[in-house]
């Protein structure tokens, strides 16, 4: 399959490339407003729309094999993948590497782990933004392709420790 971006659910193949490992980088679903939340931001939950998106994410990722689910410990990231974890009967592993502010370095830790394949990584917009910038700079995708909307997913084909292919799945 050619590298690039796809904005619809995959039809035939669930892998980016049969020779690469696959990661699903999910930006958390819509959360309640920061300005209306007075508590610890780590505990800010999904909004009603965000909970709907999280349920629909199960359908978006249905054709893909998933072996493990990692999430930022922020509540909104965990809540985004809870329906998927429940449906797949997989526990959610918390990782500080996926927290806001950890940037691409946090994602790279997972990509370097050659024992991981078909891993879901639930994280934040700043990390997904850096991922998209990196994919553009390395000519994996063209500028303006894909995006980083809430509850969207990047399906990455990883060779070694570097994403060499990417497909964008729009938010539900």
Image: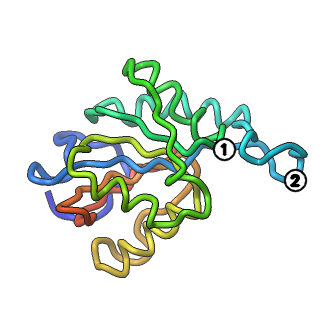
Q: Residue at x 43, y 63 (%)?
A: 146
Task: Give SS at disc 1.
Answer: loop
Q: In front: 13, or 20? A: 20
In this figure, which residue is indicated by the disc labeled 2?
35
Distance from disc 2 to disc 1, alpha carbons, whole Å, reads 14 Å
Residue 13 placement (x, y as % from top left): 17, 42
Can you say which quadrant of the picture contains the N terminus?
bottom left
Q: Residues within 10 Å of mark 1 (few under 14, many from 20)?
A: many
For numbered disc 2, what is the local secondary structure? helix
| Residue 27, x across and y down, in percent | 53, 50
Q: Which mark is residue 10?
A: none
For residue 103, side relative to residue 5 (left or right): right
Question: Residue placed at 15% from the left, 54% from the top?
Answer: 20
Which residue, given by chain and number where applicable, does mark 1 sit on?
A: 30
> Considering depth in this image, is 11 or 32 the residue closer to the camera?
32
| Viewer-nearest residue: 108 or 172 | 108
| Residue 79 in the image: above or below residue 166 | above
């Amino acid at each position: 399959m050619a590298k690039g971006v796809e904005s619809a659910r995959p039809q035939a193949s669930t892998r980016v490339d049969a020779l690469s490992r696959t990661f699903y980088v999910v930006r958390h679903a819509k959360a309640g407003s920061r300005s209306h939340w007075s508590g610890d931001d780590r505990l800010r939950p999904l909004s009603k729309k965000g909970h709907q998106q999280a349920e629909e994410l199960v359908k978006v990722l249905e054709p893909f094999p998933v072996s493990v689910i990692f999430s930022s410990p922020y509540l909104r990231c965990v809540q985004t993948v809870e329906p998927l974890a429940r449906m797949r009967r997989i526990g959610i592993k918390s990782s500080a590497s996926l927290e806001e502010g950890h940037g691409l370095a946090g994602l790279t830790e997972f990509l370097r782990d050659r024992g991981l394949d078909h891993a879901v990584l639930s994280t934040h917009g700043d990390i997904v933004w850096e991922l998209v910038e990196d994919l553009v700079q390395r000519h994996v995708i063209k500028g303006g392709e894909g995006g980083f909307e809430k509850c969207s997913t990047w399906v990455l084909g990883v060779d070694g420790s570097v994403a060499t292919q990417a497909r964008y799945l729009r938010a539900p």
